Image: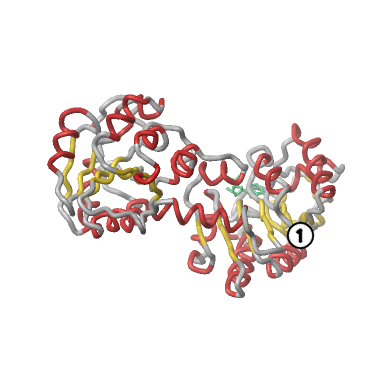
Amino acid sequence: MVTIDNFDFSGKKAIIRVDFNVPLNDKFEITDDTRMVKAVPTIKKVLEGGGSAIIMSHLGRPKGEAKPEFSLKHISGHLADLLGLEIKFADDCIGASAVEAAAALQAGEVLLLENLRYYNEETEGDKDFAGKLAALADCYINDAFGTAHRAHASTAIIADFFASDAKMFGDIVNSELSSLDAVLASPKRPLTAIMGGAKVSSKITIIKNMLDKVDNLIIGGAMKFTFIKAHGGQIGGSLVEDDYLELALEIEKEAKEKGVNLIMANDVVIADKFAADATTKVCPIDAIPEGWLGLDAGPESVERFKKVILESGTILWNGPVGVFEMEAFAGGSKAVAEAIGEATAKGAFSLIGGGDSVACINQFGMADQVSYISTAGGALLESLEGKVLPGVAAIRG
Ligand code: AMP
């Protein structure tokens, strides 16, 4: 398979789908440029290989209209700074201005196209629209893993217009895919998944898929209360999903049948209100008094979690085990993060993904102590659910 590292870009125009959907403030200044910074290596590889780069992205949700507040012009200056180059800008992503600017592009130059989502054809995966984008370039690179779960014109359909030796992934997509493979395809055993967060309902498909793969499954966060209530435990005012009690029992049964070691909290930090200054105490997970609610894993549970994590060869962490946003209830998630850091230092592979565990690891300043942090959101979750992503299939075949 052709890759960005073995492809000869010399004299070629590469159209690169990036994710420059960065947050802007009311003065249209970028408040977090992480996504742009991460895309730089791929763009540089094209330029250093003697090619030119045509950059395309969406920004916000203009819903098929050319709304100036969503113009990629707002970010072109910062892209120029990051690359140390002048950026050419086409005020449309297709049509005469794009065609002329692409035709005039010389080796080593970068052209930024206007917002793809000024056209509904982008999100509709329109073939003609994808063909017009493809016609601007000689080869196609997808470096937008965050939108790889969408069969949009620029993320998937466009790939049909390029031969298999003229389409490839960029560095971001390659890193995301190889870290997912390290967990899902060829994990070093034992493989432990730590599933936390607020709701069983939002994680159920992932949990089901992971039951076929993991050796250990730690259930933390508010979702454990649905399991505890299903067994008749007293959970006080803790968050619970009554429609999922049956399903919780099914998951337990399936875990048993599949030989998965299911690790559930046995004690909990409870609070008399959902507030940073609440009165707190520790109690057994199934004996929470009325008027109290469980907001973090208790000390015994934390010890259980740590033991399993430290013995793991591969670790996937999706969702905090408590309300980490409040200091009083961040202890469980911090201990989990520290154990993952320690296991990683001893040689385990650790993948942190899903919005809140990423926020969590960043809050604790531990981002450099894990193997890989995925910022992909939906695309990561769908991969963990076992789905094939259209943007990946379009290139991998
Ligand atoms: P999710 O987006 O499903 O991963 O959920 C993350 C959210 O779950 C975070 O905002 C946490 O504060 C919240 N959370 C974790 N544990 C609990 C709990 N015991 N009670 C209420 N919310 C929780």
Name the spot of residue 303 as percent of width and height, x first: 74, 67
Q: How many marks?
A: 1
Q: Residues within 10 Å of mark 1 (few under 14, many from 20)?
A: some
> What residue lies at 33% left-to-right and 50% top-to-bottom?
31
Left or right of 363 in this view: 340: right
Left or right: where does residue 74 sit relative to residue 323?
Answer: left
Q: Is residue 299 above or below residue 248?
A: below
Q: In the rendered image, which quarter is residue 85 located in? A: bottom left
- Can residue 23 be seen here? The reply is no
The percent position of residue 249, horizontal first and vertical second, equals 82, 41
Residue drawn at point x = 32 percent, y = 40 percent? 57
- Judging by the rendered image, the residue that carries numbered circle 1 is 282
Residue 29 position, x and y percent, is 26, 47
Image location (x, y in percent) of residue 79: 24, 51
| Left or right: 18 in relation to 323 | left
Amino acid at dot 1: Val
Going by the picture, which residue comes out furthest to the bottom?
346
Q: Would residue 197 be seen by someone viewing this image from the given angle?
A: yes
Closer to us: 351 or 23: 351
